[in-house]
Structures are given as structure tokens and as C-alpha cells.
């Protein structure tokens, strides 16, 4: 992906808050959204998802905490028997969750957002506790079973893949999903690369 594409992506996204371009899974939207996700340009023409440009560039949803549902949270430690050093909070749009509950699959255009945060910790009345603090990075996955962007290094194995860092949250810094994203998902390969085991809300 060229630096010019990154620049355009940093300042423009589609006005529609729907996580997919098809009405079947488009969620309702609040009356306002940030500039980052509302401005249209010729590079973000209509596709199957409001977060995907005609070239396959992926933008980060900025209102996922307000309009998505929380799927689950992972408390992550660097090594076994060490304190938690990150929280991984995962979100998806309500209608995509409903579709998964019905047939066990995410529909095309479904968006998963994983925010990775630093943590705070203290011994509270309930015991030793850990909670999310500031964001570090975001991972975004967008379902694409049709292989809409052949030759694009950020699309493959049924998904579009993106990585955004807190220091520059509008720029996708991933360049090749096989190197930058897929290795962490190998244990979930049998579940379409998604860690379904950690998301009880997906059960019927």
C-alpha cells in the first residue's frame, strides 16, 4: 500500500456507519460521527463495506464502543504465571453477531475490532484486579468470502486485515496479512481464524 493511499485513508471514510454495505447486516447509526469516518472521496467509492475503499484499503471504525457489541476480553500475560500486561477487548456489529448466532458464520462485510490496551492493577475488595487503561493498537478484520481484492497483501484467507497504532490511529501499518496478522491466529484456523472460544455471546 503506498504512502499516498495511507494519506488519503487518514482523512476520509464513508459516511455510512454500517459495518457492511449490504442492508442485511447494516446497524443503525447515531446522528453524528467523527470526520475520520464520514468524509467521502473518490477513493472510498461504494463497496461491500463502509470501511473498505474500492482499492481494498481498510479504515478503522472510530465509534465501535458506541455502536458495536462487546464480544469478549482476553487478559494477556507475556509468560505463564506472570502479571497481565495487556487487555484485548473485541467488538463486532450487532447484526453480524446475530447472523453468526443463526448459522455459525460471519457474513461478508462483518467487522471485528480488537483494541489492545495497557492495564492498571491493584488489590481491591474483590481481590487482585486488572483493568484496561490507554489504547496501544487496534486490529481490524473484515469478512470477505469472495476474494474481492486479489493481489492485495492485506486480503486473504477469507478476511481483510488491518493494524492501527495509537500514535497514528488513522493509518493502517500492516503491509502483508500473512506476516503481520495471520501468525497470531493460527490456533483459531479451524474457526475461520477467529477465537470463537472466547466469545460466549456468539452462542445461540
Image (cartoon, grey):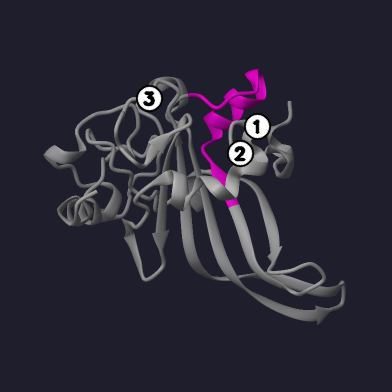
Q: Are marks 1 and 3 in contact (CB under 8 Å)?
A: no
Which residue is at a point 66% across and 25% down the rendered structure image?
Answer: 101
> Badge 2: few (under 14), some or many (20 or more) residues near its Cα, within 10 Å?
some
Q: Is residue 180 left or right of residue 195?
A: left
For the residue pair 192 and 203, the one nearer the viewer reads as: 192
Element at label 1 = helix
| Residue 69 inside the magenta-drawn segment | no
Q: Position of residue 130 (x, y in %)?
A: 73, 71
Q: Is residue 157 left or right of residue 130?
A: left
Which residue is at a point 38% across and 22% down the rendered structure image?
Answer: 22
Q: Position of residue 106 (x, y in %)?
A: 55, 27
| Residue 99 inside the magenta-drawn segment | yes
Q: Position of residue 12 (x, y in %)?
A: 21, 49
Element at label 3 = loop
84 to 22, vertically: above or below: below
Q: Which residues are magenta?
A: 90-107
Element at label 2 = loop
107 to 193, vertically: above or below: above
Which residue is tagged 3?
147
Most distant residue in the front direction = 179
Which residue is tagged 1?
191
Q: Which mark is residue 194?
A: 2
Amino acid at each position: 500500500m503506498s504512502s499516498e493511499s495511507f494519506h488519503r485513508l487518514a482523512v476520509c471514510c464513508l459516511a455510512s456507519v454500517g459495518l457492511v454495505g449490504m442492508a442485511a447486516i447494516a446497524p443503525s447509526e447515531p446522528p453524528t460521527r467523527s470526520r475520520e469516518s464520514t468524509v467521502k472521496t473518490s477513493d472510498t467509492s461504494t463497496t461491500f463495506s463502509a470501511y473498505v475503499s474500492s482499492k481494498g484499503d481498510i479504515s478503522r471504525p472510530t465509534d465501535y464502543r458506541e455502536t458495536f457489541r462487546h464480544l469478549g476480553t482476553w487478559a494477556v500475560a507475556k509468560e505463564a504465571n506472570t502479571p497481565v500486561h495487556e487487555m484485548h477487548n473485541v467488538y463486532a456489529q450487532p447484526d453480524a453477531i446475530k447472523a453468526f448466532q443463526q448459522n455459525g458464520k460471519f457474513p461478508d462485510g462483518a467487522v471485528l475490532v480488537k483494541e489492545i490496551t495497557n492495564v492498571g492493577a491493584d488489590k481491591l475488595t474483590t481481590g487482585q484486579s486488572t483493568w484496561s487503561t490507554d489504547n496501544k493498537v487496534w486490529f481490524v478484520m473484515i469478512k470477505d468470502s469472495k476474494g474481492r481484492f486479489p493481489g492485495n497483501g492485506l486480503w486473504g484467507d477469507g478476511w481483510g486485515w488491518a493494524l492501527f497504532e495509537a500514535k497514528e490511529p488513522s493509518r493502517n501499518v500492516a503491509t502483508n496479512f500473512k506476516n503481520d496478522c495471520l501468525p497470531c491466529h493460527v490456533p483459531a484456523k479451524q474457526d475461520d481464524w477467529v477465537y470463537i472460544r472466547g466469545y460466549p455471546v456468539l452462542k445461540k
